[in-house]
Structure formats: C-alpha cells, structure tokens
Amino acid sequence: MTPRRAAGRVALITALAVPATTGCAADTPAAAQAGPPVATMRVGLVEWGFATSAGALRAGPVTLQVTNAGTTAHDLRVLAGDQVRGVTPALRPGQRTTLQVDLGGLSSVTFLCTLPGHREQGMRRELPVVADSSPTDSSPTGTTTVTTAEEVPLS
C-alpha cells in the first residue's frame, strides 16, 4: 500500500469514527434521527447511551424492540415524569426483548438504564412524543449502514 493510500484510509477511518462517538451522549440532539414519529422503534443499549432508529415516538401504543448491543448488561426503563411506563429485565450482551408501552397524552419520555452507575455514565435520554394523525407506516424510517475503510475505494 502506498503512503498516500494509507493516509487516505486513516483519514477515512477518523471521519467515520468521530461522528459515531460524538452522538452517544445522553440527550444529545445529534444522536436523534430525523423523520416522523414512529410507533415501532428499535433501541440499542450501548456503553453509555441509547441508539434509536428514530428521533421521536408517536403518541399512543408503542412497541420498543430492545437489543443490548453493548458489552455489559443493561436494562431500559421508560419514564413519563416520575411515572414508569415500561421496563425490561437486565439484558446480557446480545439479548433482545420487546416492550409495549402506552404513550397516549404525553409530550416526552425518558429512557434510563437503572443498573448501578449506568445513568451517571450517560445512559439517560429524553425523546419527544408527538401526536401524529397521518396514515403513514409506523415502522422506523432510519437505517444505518457501516462501511469499513477496506470497502471504500480511495483515489
């Protein structure tokens, strides 16, 4: 590999890695995806935050497809103010569960991990809940594609 090509790969890897790590903090608007509110959301539990397939939830019945994508145990508690709307058991890395919650009449919810120390490390995120009367599909609209440096041709 030529020095120019190696430098290009290092720059590309840095460009891909920096945005991926800066959006992980709790309550960071950059972590949210654009698009309409959804009634079905994929939620990834990672160190130390939540990766979601959309930036807002639809008011009413909601399905959360929760996966522990991290390397340590995590759980998910959904709060509306001080009221618990849903909770998962502690999930080992790779485990999945589905959580049904009713978000009718709410304007926002908070996602928390309740395992010791996790909230303090950033596993807290507020999401808007939006009344949406449009007849569109309620499935998540965002997808994430990860491309490694080896797959990207450099000139």
Image: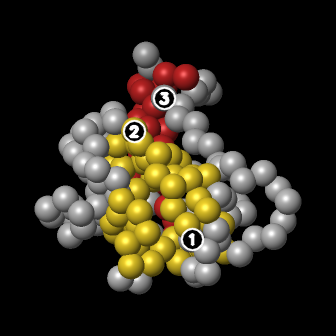
Which class describes the residues within 10 Å of circle 3: few (<14), some (14-19), or many (20+)?
few
Where residue 96 is drawn, which disc sits there?
2
Residue 2 picture quarter: top left
Q: Disc 1 to disc 3, how far (Cα)? A: 38 Å
Q: Position of residue 133 (x, y in %)?
A: 81, 70
Q: Which of the two labelled residues, at mark 1 and mark 2, occupies the earlier sequence position? A: 2
Q: Disc 2 to disc 3, how far (Cα)? A: 26 Å
- The residue positioned 41% from the left and 42% from the top of the image is 97
Q: Position of residue 64 (x, y in %)?
A: 51, 52
- The residue positioned 24% from the left and 63% from the top of the image is 114
Where residue 24 is drawn, which disc sits there?
none
Can residue 113 be seen from the camera position used here?
A: yes
* Type of amino acid at the residue the image marks with label 2: Arg
Q: How many marks?
A: 3
Q: State the residue position of label 1.
A: 103
**Element type where label 1 sits in the image:** loop
Q: State the residue position of label 3.
A: 148
**Element type where label 2 sits in the image:** strand
Q: Which of the two labelled residues, at mark 2 and mark 3, occupies the earlier sequence position? A: 2
Mark 1 vs mark 2, foreground winner is 1
Q: Which of the two labelled residues, at mark 1 and mark 3, occupies the earlier sequence position? A: 1
* Type of amino acid at the residue the image marks with label 1: Leu
